[in-house]
Image (cartoon, rainbow, N blue to C red):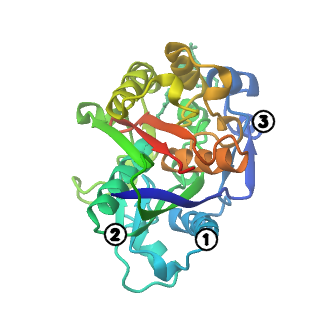
Amino acid sequence: MKRAILKGTGRYLPPRIVTNEDLAQWMDTSDEWIQQRTGIEQRHWIPEEGGVGASDLGLEASNIALDQAGWVPEDIDLIIFATLSPDIFFPGSGCLLQHKLGLDSTPALDIRQQCTGFLYGLEIVKAYIESGLANRILLVGAEVHSTGLDVSTEGRDVTVIFGDGAGAACFEAVDTAAEVGILATSLHARGEFYDSLMIEAPTSRENPRIDDAMLKEKRHFTNMDGKLIFKNAVKMLPKVAKKTLDRVGISKDDIDLYIPHQANMRINQFFQQFMKLDDDKVFHNIQRYGNTTAGSIPIALDEALEMKLIGAGSTICLLGFGAGLTWGSVIYRFPE
Ligand code: UT7
């Protein structure tokens, strides 16, 4: 049977570091509040003057992943690009990345599932590879949040948590009888709460799509009902992890490392407590990067591999919850 096997990963964080103290100069907040409520110490943002899009961050991460996989761009059968902050309204950032990789006909698919974008992407990778539709897939998660954040005190609950960054992963079809690769996925969405975390403008349901009034009302900035998201995340993450564990037929202790979306350190600590997991079973890097949404899981996966926390024979569970609302989990096993 064809299995989707990870051949390379990469991450890219723009070099500009914004510390909690930096934020405290622009808004009424403090390093103490941010660390206590979120675990975040700093995040990376693109240059203040802009000029860098999600596809640019994605390109840097992709080049590293391709190198590690030993692929050239022409080897890719399909590009999947997960982002909530595309370079432009349309076409999708996958098309921009395809061009930046020097390709001229490789299909490129954008998906818009926010914090669970990478997880939705993994299910697509599994389906394409196992069905034989594609043999080599580049999956990217990338975000430029910083240009959509209100850096005044009014936006402080949202702005302090988000960072810019990208992660990429190369998956290849491998014919094997072994139980390896993307073993199972569980995905969910609940559109009822679509407006609990969103950027509304520019919007196709208004004419013009954006105007001065909308800018004044800050409808072009990220808006979030943090408490609603927090409560639902804490409730749904253990459930969705359990669902995928059951699908594979393994127990929570068979997982070598849980790599959750990095939204808030406290959410992941609640998850750990609820699942009764040791400290070294749950990966955190939110301290350094903040919440990079679709970028967060592939960035964390790349770091965990680099730190040799996981490798040949490891079984991992990737999971996340966020805007949409969307949530999900994926179990992957590395070949021996
Ligand atoms: O990845 C996408 C999914 N997003 C998430 O998962 C986010 C989930 N939610 C959260 O992470 C948290 O709800 C936040 C970090 C956004 C907020 O933390 P909280 O513990 O829910 O704080 P809160 O909104 O209840 O605010 C508590 C207090 C308020 O003051 P009062 O009303 O008690 O006087 C806020 O005005 O903290 C105040 N506050 C701040 N103070 C300093 C809110 N933001 C800040 C800030 N600095 N940045």
The image position of residue 304, as x and y in percent, is 66, 44
Please state the horizontal and vertical placement of residue 151, each as a whole percent of the image. Answer: 61, 42
**Residue furthest right as drawn:** 21
Q: Which residue is mark 1?
A: 63
Front label number (2 vs 3): 2
Q: Which residue is mark 3?
A: 21
Which quadrant would residue 60 be assigned to in this image? bottom right
Residue at 59% across / 20% down in the picture?
269
Q: Earlier in the sequence, mark 3 or mark 1?
A: 3
Q: Quadrant of the N terminus?
A: bottom left
- Among the 4 quarters of the image, the one containing residue 38: top right
148 is higher (above) or lower (below) than 159: below
Query: Do callouts 3 and 1 mark residues in contact (Cβ within 8 Å)?
Result: no
Callout 2: SS: loop
> As drawn, which residue projects farthest toward the front?
177
Instruction: Report if the beta carbon of the residue with label 3 is closer than 8 angstroms to ligand 1.
Output: no
In the displayed structure, does residue 236 sit left or right of residue 49? left
- Of badges 3 and 1, the one in the foreground is 1
CA distance for labels 2 and 1: 20 Å
Viewer-proximal residue, 255 or 43?
255
How packed mark 3 is, by other alpha carbons closer than 10 Å (few <14, some 14-19, many 20 or more), is some
| Amino acid tagged 3 | Glu
Residue drawn at the location 36% of the way across and 62% of the way down = 110
Image quadrant of ligand 1 equals top right
Q: Residue 250 location, x and y as percent? A: 42, 28
Name which residue lies at 51% across and 79% down: 73
Q: Which residue is mark 2?
A: 134
> Callout 1, which amino acid?
Asn
Which one is nearer the viewer's eye here, 76 or 212? 76
